[in-house]
Every structure is written in C-alpha cells, then in structure tokens.
Amino acid sequence: MSALDPLHRTKAEEPPRAPSAWARFFDSDIWYSFTRSPVTVVSALIVLIFVVGALFAPWIAPHNPFNPAELNLMDGFTPPMGEAFSGNLYLLGTDDQGRDVFSTILYGARISLFVGFCAVLFAMVLGISLGLLAGYRGGWVDSLIMRIADVQLSFPAILVALLIFGVARAMLPRSMQGEMVIWVLIIAIGLSDWVQYARTVRGTAMVEKNKEYVQAARVIGIHPLLIMLRHVLPNVLGPVLVIATIGLALAIIAEATLSFLGVGVPPTTPSLGTLIRIGNDFLFSGEWWITLFPGLALILLALSVNLLGDWLRDALNPKLR
Amino acid sequence: MRLGRALVSSVALGIVLAFTAPAEAKTLRYAFQSSINSFDPHALNETFTLGFHGNIYEGLTRRTPDLEIEPALAVSWEMVEPTRWRVKLREGVTFHSGHPFTADDVIFSFERASSDASDMNGKVGSIVEVVKVDDHTVDFITGAPDAILHAEWDTWYIMSKPWAEEVGALDVASVAADREHHTTRNANGTGPFRLVSYDPDGQTILEPFEDWWDEPEHNLSRVVFQPITQTSTRVAALLSGEVDVAEPIPLQDIDRINENPGTKALTGPELRTIFLGMDQWRDELTYSNIKGKNPLQDQRVRQAMYQAIDIEAIHRVVMRGQSLPSAAMLAPGLVGFPEDLERYPHDPDAARALLEEAGYPDGFSLRMNCPNDRYVNDEAICEAVVAMLARVGIEVDLLAETRSLYFAKVLAQGGYDTDFYLLGWTPSSFDSHNVLYNLVATRDPERGRGTTNLGGYSNSRVDELTDLIQTATDQEERLALIQEAWQILHDDVGYIPLHQQALAWGVRDGVNLVQRADNQFVWRHVRID
C-alpha cells in the first residue's frame, strides 16, 4: 500500500487491506501541512536535535559538568574556542568553575526537557481528569472545580510554583532535597499549569455529552467512567495536544525562571536557568559567553516548541483547514 | 483607562520627586549584599552586623580610622589591681529613647552579652563581675589578670536597662529563634544615628541623633540603607547613580567601576581571614556515610583535605588575584602573626595516600555549609573546594545559603549543626589572642571561651597557652607563646586557612568616607560634597 496512491482512501474501507499506521500518518492532512511549512520543519528539527542531545548527553558531551572531580578550576573563564590553562579546547568556553559551557548546555537541557515533559504530563493528567469530571458531571462538582481553577488562574503561575516550592522545601528533610528537587519542580510547575487543560476539556466535554452517541452509550448502560474515557476523551485530545505543546515551552521557561531565581536545581548540577544566573554576574566584566549561549539555547528551544504548537493548533483546527 | 494610567504615572512621579528632594539634603544611600537581620546588638558577632550596629549603638570605646582605641562611653580606664579595672563613664549621654546613660546600663549590657542566647560571650568572657561604684563609675573584676580587657569594648554595645525593661527586651533575640523580639526591629543606642524605619527587604532609614554627645564630623541628614542581593544589580545601581556606596563590589567589576566617570572602587587588603573548619568533636559526623566514627577526628584526614585544596587556583580564578593565600588564621600585621608558617603544599596524590593510610581508601561523604552572600565569592570558593575534594575521593554535599540561615545553623545558637564549613574572621582586638580565644581554644560556655570554635577543635596545650597569653605582660615572652600556639594548630590541622580577601567598595565621586581595614563602614566620618 503506497502512501502516494491517490485512491487508497476509498480502498481503506476494505477491511483486510487496512493501511499501516505509518502509511496513514504520512498520508494524513497533518503530515501534508507539516511538509508545506518550512518554519515548522526547522522547528521540529531543532527540537529533535535538543532531545537527542539531551538524551545522549553522556556520550555526546566532551565533559561531564556534573561530576566535580572532572572540573579543573584553572580552566575557569576560558573564552569560546580559547586556549585553556590545561590545554583543553572548549567550544563555547567555560564558566567560573571551569565547567565546559557546551557540555553544561547539553546536560542542562536534559534537566530542562525532563522537567518540562514530566510537568506537562502531570498537568495534563490532572487537568484532563478534573476537566472531564467537571464537564460530564456538571452541577456542584463543576462549580467547585471551576471556582478553584478561577482562583488559581488569578495568581501568576510562577508565584504558585514558588509557593509550592517553598512549602516543599520547609517540609522535606534536607537529605532528601537533593534528589527531590527535580520532582518538586515538576509538581510545582504542573500544579500551576493544570487549569488550562481543565477548562478546555470541560468545555468540549459539555458539548460532547449532549451529542447522540454519548446519549446512546448512556442508554445502553455503559458506566459513566467508561463513557468519559472511551467516547468523550478522544474528542478533546486535539486541543489538549496543542495546549500541551505550548505548555512544554512554558514549563521549560518556568524551570529556567525558578533556577534563575535560585530556588531550582542546586548550583553543582546547573540547568540552563542556573547557568544564565551564574553568567549574569559576569556580564559587566566581559565574560559574555557564560550567559549568552545557555540563553540562546533556551530561546531556541522554547521558540521552536512554541512554533510547533502554533502549527499544530492550525493543523488541528477544522475551521482553518 | 488612558486617564487612569496618566494619573498613576503622575502620582508615581510625585513619589519619586518626594523621595529625591531630600537627596539634596545630604542623604547617604548605601547598598549591601544582604539585609540587616536584627538590631539586637548582642545577637550576632559578625562584622557587617557589628559595623551597622556601631552607627546606632556605642561601646565603652571606639576605634579611629587607623583602628586605634579612643574613649567613647567611657572617658578613662585604669587597672587599679591586677584583676580590677576602674572605668569612668561619660556623663550627660542620653539614649535615643531619652533615657540617661548610667552605670546600671553597663552592668545590664554585661549580663545580657554574657547570657546563653548572646553571641558576644567572647568579648566579655574574662569579666567575672561588674561592680557599680557610683552612677558614672564601674569596676570590672576579672578572673585572671587581663592586659587586653578593653580591646573589644568597641563592639560590645551598651543598651539602656530601663528601655529594655519597658519594651521587654531583656533577653537576647537569638539568631536561631524563629520568633521575633522587640530588638529585631527596634534599636536604641547612644550612637550618632537613630533608626527611623526598618524594612528587611526594602529601605531602612536612619537619621542623625541630635542629642549625640560628640560633635558630628559627618554632614549627613539621612542614611538610606538598601540590600541588593544580586551582584550585577548592585553594580548597576552604583553605575547609574542610584546609590552612593555599594558593598561589596565583585572583583571582576572593579575596572569597570573605575573607568565609569563618577564612580570609583576603593580596594585594600582586609584583615579578615577566610578558612575552612571541620567538626572534630562529634563521635560521628552528622551528614556522612561513615557511621560510628568521625573521620575528621583523624589528623591525617584533615591534612589530606588541606593538601587537596589548590589555593593558587582559587587565588587566580575565583579571587582573580585579589586575595592573599594564608597559612595562618590571621592577617599579616596583626599582633602575633606567625611569619614562619607555610601552607602544606597542594598535592592530591599525597592527599589520597593520607586518606588511604587513615583507612578511607574510597573516601567518604560529608556536608559543607557555606554562606552565599557574606564573603567575597564565598559560594564560588565552596564550589571550587567541593570539586577539589571530589578529586581525592571526598564527596561533599554543598549547602550554600543566605547568611541568616547559614549562621542560624552553624553557630552555638544553632547547636553547631555542621560537618564542614567556610567562615571568615577578623579579630576585633587585632591580636592573636582573640583568634585563639574564640576560634581555637576548647569550647567553654561558662567562660565564653571558644564560642566560635564551631568544629570543636581541642588541644589542652593550646588552652593553656591561650590563658598564658592573656595574662602575659612581657611582650617578647607573649609573642613566643603565641607562636607556639599557632605552630600546634598548624601541626594538628585544626583549621584549613585559605586567604585574606580584598576589600572592594564602590563609591560615587563626591562621597568622602573612611574605609577601615576591618571592613566596618562608619557613617560618622562620611561627608558628601
């Protein structure tokens, strides 16, 4: 079954010759609109490079900036491509402790992307569950959940994250904080972000639940939970996917912001935000590379993810097709 | 909407104008890297706090710009017997609250400063009793003869007893306490400036005290203090003329501040020594993977840590050449500086061998406490130390935090809750005895000795020497005793001295001030053109 076969749409209705998932994907409208948008292709490539770089950082990065034993303080403040004290070559220079900026960006992107993905996943699960519940059940459940959402929406997300972070810091024993800090970040960002999902899902669920297929399902006695999951949920996934993509960019920036403010990951395992904060102190004295390169990396990553999200929104919107 | 915004901005402009208007009347705008956490004069024995308080409170003596002792609240003092000093107090002095200054205030301040919650025990430790002779004369009774009894009176501040009774400030507002005391936010001294308003994260405003007993040398009508934690923001505030004095200035920005028209950087060697301390008194380190014993009690382990540290790299990269690597626990030029002492050489191989010999071939782990806004590049020094120790197998969990949290843990008031820490010390008497008494001698809360010996280093010979040094009257003999004590400490590796840091203040042109080598900023010398 060739993806180029113009007739396959009608053939697809023949049960034994159903096309493979890949073939269906490459032939979809989404793929078509993707290949027609150079900006999107470039963004996707950049995101892909970041993801691969972050995943394989231990093999790609020339140094391990998180292992203090590998640091050479005498190499500190080496400019990009400059000769270091030890004779090592550093592509993007080193920071104040002699950490290779290039390696630190790779390792830092690892933290940023991990925190971003997990936070979005957490926010999505929480938001979808509450949104479905509110939209499908209605009544006082709906009012309660949506009022909580309203209240939370009136605080800036970063403030909510800071609050959660502060509480967690006070509650957790210090010995656990080293490992816990990333999970706390994820929960903090996730908890400050779920409202968007809940609102979108609720709106769609309210529309869908009155349609005939849902009513039919109800009439034949399917459990409400099953109706929500099997019938309503697939119909709300489109807009959720769009929010999730844009939310990923926001989560990455939120992590960087928290780290920049000094409440995120500890300075010995810097993420992009931490690097930018460290470099900020040396901007006046001419050591621009410590803050510039991580900053550029952050902008590039956040921008690409955002552009992808924009494109997805247009591609999934039937009115714009 | 437009109208509203215009209204808001014109109100904002009005506020700005209202604030800038008094600037014409000689306002000193001063920025430091952290806020002032308390106005209790006996809570925290730390230079910035002491220096700040010294503008509000006064001791029996004070120091001139050259750090000479001169009379302040006492007009004269003499040793009438070897263990009895008679002190004549200044008459006609009033506190900011209007209470007159009397002998009762001195007795009260002595008792308060030697209480458990106080951090000033060491300053009055050799005094057994203060006896009132008349309203303006007191006798200080010491346990043993003390030739340098008055050396630290300049930072032992006098509080008003009747005022403390009125407001309920009899107890010291301990730095470890969660609860605020009256003295956390209120101050009442006899000094040249009185506290007008306090905002820990915003502006703290002080004004000259009209009834000050001395003739003011300054021409200030107001002092506005503002903490600016972010280094680059602090520098930017100075460069843009938003503040008159910014302290400290990061080493990398000294050139830029000097090149900028209208600002200059004042630099000089500071008398403060930065060092690392190690817990040697617990039988088991609190935050280590080694259980049942304390590796830091082994001299070989301490020497291994010493030799693992590459002080030249710290000097060159972290301090940008603005430090003086030190083998001693005090700065050159102070009384009893051990000139012959040399640092153990940097040698990671020797360090690993020592660790293996001590029974830790795979190293061990421990936690390090570090302030991140107290000393020049303190956090960066700690990070560098962590990396250097990692290379010989010692895994350090670095806990770098703001100074109020840091001090609340590591000091006596916090139960010395630390394995390994970075601290700086300026002997306020400018004499070896102060360092030996506070940092090196065995802890003795009864006598106020060894209060800042956070690691609990203990050597009975050093204790003996410390007592002898205090009472010795023959200068040569005294110096020999001091040398012996420093040599023992060096051999024991009781501490790991790092360096003396450089002072760097950023000052706007037209602001004339005195930069004292003990890094106290004394506003009574400030004149603004």
Image: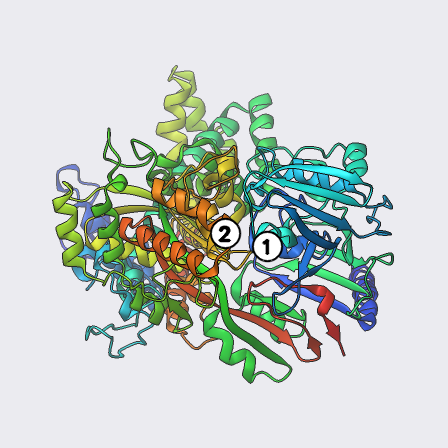
Residue lying at the far top in this picture: please name it: A221
Q: CA distance from mark 2 to mark 1?
A: 9 Å
Disc 2 and disc 1 in contact, CB within 8 angstroms? yes
Residue A35 appears left or right of B118: left
| Colouring chosen for the image of the structure | rainbow
B18 to the left or right of B119: right
- Secondary structure at badge 2 equals helix
- Residue A43, given in percent of the width and then of the height, sits at 34, 63
Q: Is residue B529 visible?
A: yes
Tag 1 secondary structure? helix
Is B244 in front, or is B120? B120
Q: Chain of mark 1?
A: B
> Residue beneath label 1, please?
B151
Of the numbered discs 2 and 1, the one sitting upstream in the chain is 1
A255 relative to B2, above or below: above
- Tell which of A1 and A44 is nearer to you: A44
If the image is split into quadrants, where does the C terminus of chain B sit?
Answer: bottom right
Q: Chain of mark 2?
A: B
Tell me: residue B290, above or below residue A256: above
- Amino acid carrying mark 1 in the image: Ala
Residue A245 placed where, x, y %?
A: 39, 50
Q: Residue at x 23, y 57 (%)?
A: B307
As shown in the figure, which amino acid type bears the numbered disc 2?
A: Asn
Q: Nearer the viewer, residue B255 or B134?
A: B134
Question: Where's residue A289, x and y in %?
Answer: 37, 72
Q: Quadrant of residue B417?
A: top left
Residue that numbered label 2 is attached to = B434
Please count the marks in the image: 2
